[in-house]
Image (cartoon, helix red, strand yellow):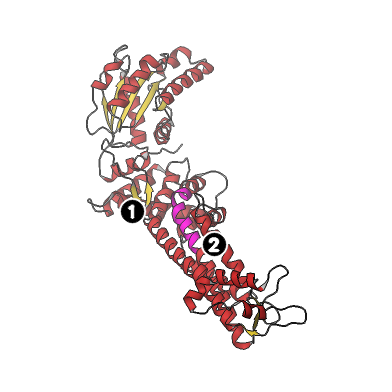
Amino acid sequence: MRRVSPAAAPAAAPARALTLAEPAARRVLLVRAHETADTPLWTAEDRAWATRLARETVPADAAPAHFLDERARHALQRLAPRDAAIARWQDRRLWRWTWLLAALALGLLAGLAVDAVGSAQRIDLLAPPVWGVILWNLAVYVALLLPRGLLRGGRLAGWLARRLAGGRVRGSGPLATFTADWVPRVLPALAARAALLLHAAAAALAAGLVAGMYLRGLVLDYRAGWESTFLEPASVQALLATLLAPASALTGIAVPDEATISALRVGPGVAAGAPAAPWIHLYAAMLALCVIVPRSALAVWAALRGAWAARGVKLSPEDPYLQQLLLQGRGAAPRVRVLPHGAAPSPQAVLGLRELLAGALGAEMQLRLAAPVAYGAEEGAGARPAEPDTTLLVALVDLAATPEADTHGRLLRELRAAAPALPLLLLADEAGFARRFGQLPDRLAQRREAWRQLAAAEGAAWLSADLERPAADAAAHFAQALQAPPPAR
């Protein structure tokens, strides 16, 4: 099994989130998915090479995000040629302005294709397609004001955002892990871009509708009229005056009085005879006021939100993987403090422990073995503070002991309270238990599970290993135990 270098967080871990530009965050997470997985595409030698090269090319006073990005660039130089899928992900454009041009073109063509003035070269004053477009957009504005608006977290924008992210990678493996980690982090930027495309298309559709009315009016003689089974001229005049009031105020074109509206009524054998130009101006103004201007403003706002979100993809400074990389970037060696419980480990177990830690954290790792904590003295364990430069705290117990919340659990709580910023690992030595019950695998599994439950209850990482005879993959399991998120307490 490939050895994965785990994280050992520095005692003075940065409190603020690591902020990277969208392309840099994608590179870092893509490499992270491969470095924390058991894959032949990436080895411990590759990892050391990428770290060393980044340390050589990044200035000592550079920001942590710069080091992470530079290291990811170097890592992808080796990863991409080994897997075509990685190369495709690396080369995929996160945003293309041609998508916006396509949305504008499609919206404009759709607006031009709409029969804006109806059949028989007549504008039906009560039922032109203009009102349908305006009503739809007003409904969108109302939806945007709701907690889960149509375009803000809505299904259409959400689907479009995920398509912009590159879709989903089925199955398992590093790329599936990367996609699951990547998409939620950039969803704000992707949702803003999806909203930009939808707003731009809506504005372009309304503009195409206006252009279609005027273009048809240039070559055809359109007339205006209305017909209704239920409405009378007075009601029609009041309705149009109310609906078109904003356009009238903008253009200075007043809606005719009741007598004029009555004369515009058409029916069997009565054709529309009034010029349609004033009405075209009014409906064009309504589209500009209700659709083109608001949607254009929303599109600009979405573009600004998307650009801002893309500049600051946040990665957690408490991520063990990132902490370890930043520690290596500063040239610092991991410093592990081991606190035995009950009795000191045997010399052979100490050698095995050192081998285990070096295999997981690197040969430059420094081990500090504290004096054992006697049974019953757990409450004072926190009074022995770890050295300021400690990066990992390990509570070493004997798997043969029965885990107890009042003793071992108290020990973990004391250590956690004394150094809340340090990652805490409960390591159970199986050597003594294996000598006594090596022929009873079920009993070994039961005891492991009991210790695991205790560690989970106290929010500590957990691992068991025979320190006198560490298995070949023990270092990798040690790394994975630290890479896993802390159990919920």
Q: Nearer the viewer, residue 208 or 253?
A: 253
Residue 161: image tag: none
- Is residue 213 toward the left or the right of residue 266 in the image? left
Between discs 2 and 1, the one toward the N terminus: 1
Q: Residue at x 56, y 53 (%)?
A: 155
- Report the amino acid beneath label 2: Leu
- Is residue 460 toward the left or the right of residue 197 in the image? left
What range is drawn magenta here? 182-196
Q: Which residue is mark 2?
A: 138
Quadrant housing the C terminus: top left
Q: What type of secondary structure mainly makes up the magenta span?
A: helix
- Report the amino acid beneath label 1: Glu
Q: Nearer the viewer, residue 14 or 435?
A: 14
Q: Is the Cβ of the residue at disc 2 closer than 8 Å to that at disc 1? A: no
Structural crowding at the residue carrying mark 1, measured as other residues with C-alpha within 10 Å and reported as few (<14), some (14–19) or many (≥20): many
Question: In this view of the protein, can residue 361 be seen by the observer?
Answer: yes
Q: Which residue is mark 1?
A: 70
- Is residue 22 toward the left or the right of residue 147 in the image? left
Check disc 2 and report its element: helix, strand or loop. Answer: helix
